[in-house]
Image (tube, helix red, strand yellow):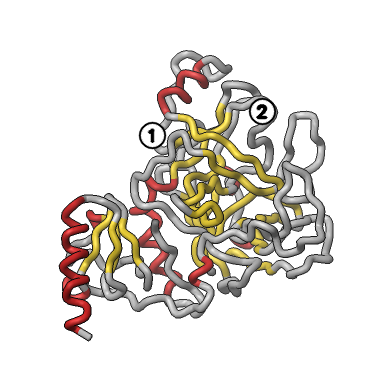
Amino acid sequence: MSRFFAPLVIFLGLILSSGATHMCLSSDLCVPRENCREEEAFFDFRSTIECSDAEVCCEKSNVIGMISPPQHPLDRLLGTSNPNGLDGSTQVHDDQSKPNQFPWVMALFVKDSYLGGGSLITPGLVLTAAHILVELSPNDIMVRAGEWDLSSSENLSPPMDRQVIKILNHEAFNYSSAANNLALLFLDSPFELGANIQTIRLPIPDKTFDRRICTVAGWGMRSSADVDVQPIQQKVDLPVVESPKCQRQLRLTRLGSNYQLPASLMCAGGEEGRDVCFLFGGSALFCSQDGDPNRYEQAGIVSFGVGCGQPNVPTTFTHVSKFREWINPHLKQVLSVPGNTLPAMT
């Protein structure tokens, strides 16, 4: 067996030195380059590994505290959508998701009232926005996975509920500017993964998504004229706007000519009639991975907008890739709970 792999190892070494996207042996760890250090103890592991230019493979012998590969048989579905939904007989409009099309989308409730959105990043941990949690305690919040129609209990795959036991807001969150607007919700028990409930991939640190067309899915009001939350899960595709352009556009709004877009925010949208409106706060902005239109990673978290669906007025999102170093240590806290697995990085 070792003779068979020898030429392959040499070939892979040549690819590694070329700087191009490369494949790694399944016994290696494909991680961000800055994480391939002996002092680093938290890694992503994939049995089939493809490294980007920003990643490198670490030999097992150089890794201290290596975490065993996830054993859950559904890990292969991580970040994978159900493009046709799980109920092909259900008719939907263009602005609606198909049933369980995006299985990482979470619905947050306070006393049976819809609060906002979130994303499942490991079975016992939800990523959301800090601004929707102000003045709330963990006991106030229930998280629902596998939901699609808030008005119906007749779902093909019944949703599951979990109680929040801990809220962790980013310590530098600023409500006025929306800087560092993210929070983690620790659940009383992990969700059971399946076709209708799955985790979303997280991006490598500092990855950008400029000019990509990405998607937001959740529940909310699609215009300022709406008075009730739309019960069917909504979706909208939005172009990601470069930060300098977004700041220029937002300075033309009531925010004023001196507005400074925080470095922790990114922008998307600004197309008339197609934008994220009220009560989508905390929902994920997710983008398809290169070469696979049905597999996604989370780029942002809905933060705030000025107006709704106005041309040249983008919505702001917390830039998730800027917070990998903040998220990773807290992920360790839930890995000891049966059913939790590592979120993969692209």
Please report whichever mark, 1 or 2, sits nearer to the chain's N-terminal start: 1
**Drawn side of residue 286 relative to residue 278, left or right:** left
Any part of residue 344 in sight: yes
**Drawn side of residue 228 relative to residue 30, left or right:** right
Amino acid type indicated by mark 1: Ala
Amino acid type indicated by mark 2: Gly
Percent x, y of residue 149: 78, 56
Which one is in front in this view, the residue at disc 1 or the one at disc 2? 2
Mark 2 surroundings: few (<14), some (14-19) or many (≥20) residues within 10 A: many
Residue matched to label 2: 309
C-alpha distance separating marks 1 and 2? 24 Å
At 75% from the left and 52% from the top, the residue drawn is 113
| In this view, 69 is above or below 229 | below
The N terminus sits in image quarter:
bottom left
| In this view, 330 is above or below 245 | below
| In this view, 68 is above or below 151 | below
Q: How many marks?
A: 2
**Drawn side of residue 209 relative to residue 77, left or right:** left
At 77% from the left and 68% from the top, the residue drawn is 156
At 48% from the left and 77% from the top, the residue drawn is 337
Percent x, y of residue 33: 23, 55
Percent x, y of residue 264: 41, 38
